[in-house]
Amino acid sequence: MLWLDAIDVWRGPSQVLRQVSLRVEAGEIVTLLGANGAGKTSTLLTVSGHLRPRAGRARLAAAGREADLARLAPPQIVAAGVAHCPEGRQVFGGMTVLENLRLGAFLRRDGEERADIDRMMGLFPILRERSSGLAGQLSGGEQMMLAMARALMSRPRLLLLDEPSLGLAPQMVERIFDVITRIRDTGTTVLLVEQNAAMALEIADRAYVLESGEIQLSGPAATLVDDPRVQEAYLGVLPAPAEPGPADGRLS
Amino acid sequence: MSGAYVLQQLVNGLVLGSLYALVAVGFSMIYGIVRLINFAHGDVMMVGAFSAYAILTAFGLPLWSAVLAVLTLGAVLAMLIDAVAFRPQRGAPQVNGFITSLGVAILMQNLAILTLSGQPRPFNVPGWLKENIGFMGARMTVLDAAIVLVTLAVLGALVVFVKRSRAGLAMRATAENPLAASLMGIRINRAVATAFGLGGALAGLAGLLWGARAGQIDPLMGFLPGLKAFVAAVIGGVGSLPGAVLGGFVVGFAEVLFVGLLPPLYGAYRDAFVFGLLIVILLVLPNGLLGRSVEDRA
Ligand SMILES: Nc1ncnc2c1ncn2[C@@H]1O[C@H](COP(=O)(O)OP(=O)(O)OP(=O)(O)O)[C@@H](O)[C@H]1O
Ligand SMILES: [Mg+2]
């Protein structure tokens, strides 16, 4: 569905992605992990056409055809079935919940937008309750649900999610991850950027670890969970001491 | 000072305020979507006035064709200015756009002086527009009434367009968050062009109405109204459409009352008074009358 092939991306004077290769197959949840500033958001922005690779190839299988992402403008990428739910939710705070959902379907003219808005309100009942309220007055968790619903309104085949759990209470995080799994089960492929590596690896099929703009590790999620490097850096597991004790006289 | 005199000043303020509101709304819309302080906006009004002059006086065509022409020309001109001067530097610091707009304004004024001469020209309108229909004893011409009614009708149509149409939705989304709008599949350049086009159409129309009321036009006629529309937009809360309309009327009334109610000696200070008013209002309400703080919108 999506192939990044050794792409280099620059933002202003600095290179933020180096030779990044990554693939997402239809029906998968793929997660992209990494510390702050690793380049996760930049990767997603490249896929949605807001950053352009300076080298390498980025391809998208869209409607049975393969398209070169470099040739598509952002609206064409949306039309090709990619929805990007951005970091920090970015709902239209001065507009109503309903208008936000309508904007999610901006490019659609199939006449089923109304029905989909209804479906979204079934998926996230709070949105129905607050449908004529301003999006900016929703809580952080509610805004996240709106942002996801808005992204789904384009009927994407590939959904890009950038840190959906950021700043949310544990219960809300559970719900969001539950919804992500359901989204995949209804046929939408997911590329999930997360700092909550434990949860992400739990629901993902495969994972990539990005460090300073380079892919350091990749593989099935189940394998990466057990990788000591992942455990140490992202799962908060302390490394097993190589030799026992404070014999060397230093505190670690 | 009689009641009739005050009423007369109020009528004058209403008419002048309408004209400012027409220009201020476009100014505010453009600021709202690209954070650009567009000093060339008043000069679109000037071009509108000269186009109307050509159509009415030189070609002798009917009034309605002049109205259609200024709406169209104003829109096209503003979109052209955007595409040529502002779009290439989108994303640059705000001051770049500000300076560019000053450059465009000076260029337009001087091109107009070069090609049309700096001499004011009489702007004649059909006689029936000058008939006095009166308003509760105050003098009010057909033209005055038309200015107020046309302004209200056009602003009403604008509100419906911005609130209800797909292009209006795209415009509002882009004004609020360009990246998020782009993620929805909205073409940012097109949404920005819509704002320039609508603003330009209103400015063109204001040019026709202004010329008709003043009875003469000249290449620099857009400068002060443009500046006062800026004041009106800021007073109302820049980026807010109702705010711009309200600001336009506040400036119009304030100016007329200042001139009308104080001894004639002070009349020459009307512009200074308008800018003084701006300073006072901003000291009390930093975001203008109806504006939200910039932080809220980020
Ligand atoms: N607008 C920008 N202009 C220039 N450089 C930027 C910009 N935004 C981010 N960067 C830089 O690009 C690099 C990658 O940033 P990116 O936002 O992709 O990281 P991230 O992995 O998403 O981080 P986080 O977990 O904090 O969201 C960082 O070094 C960052 O400083
Ligand atoms: Mg990020």
Image: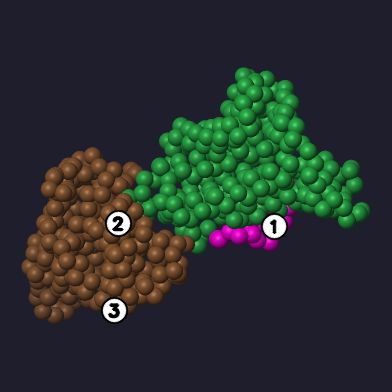
**CA gap, disc 3 and disc 1:** 47 Å
On the image, the x and y values in percent for residue B267 come to: 84, 43
Q: Mark 1 lies on which chain?
A: B
Q: How crowded is mark 3: few (under 14 residues within 10 Å), some or many (20 or more)?
A: few
Measuring 54% from the left and 49% from the top, which residue is drawn there? B158
Query: Is label 1 on the same chain as label 2?
Result: no
- In the depicted view, which residue is nearer to us: B90 or A25? A25
Q: Which residue lies furthest to the right in this view?
A: B1
Can residue B235 be seen by looking at this rendering?
no
Tell me the shade of chain A: brown
Q: Is mark 3 on a helix, strand or loop?
A: helix
Q: State the SS at label 1.
A: helix
Say whether marks 3 and 1 touch (CB < 8 Å).
no
Report which residue position mark 1 lands on: B281
Quadrant including the C terminus of chain A: bottom left
Residue type at mark 1? Ile
- Residue B139: which quarter of the image? top right
- Residue drawn 16% across and 55% down? A215
Query: Does the segment drawn in magenta span residue B283?
Result: yes
Write the start and end of the magenta stretch as one range.
B274-293
Residue for badge 2: A111
- Percent coordinates x, y for residue B72 in the rendering: 52, 34
Q: B66 or A26: nearer the eye?
A: B66
Distance of label 3 from label 2 (alpha carbons): 38 Å
Residue A26 location (% of width, % of height) = 12, 58
**Viewer-side residue, B14 vs B281:** B14
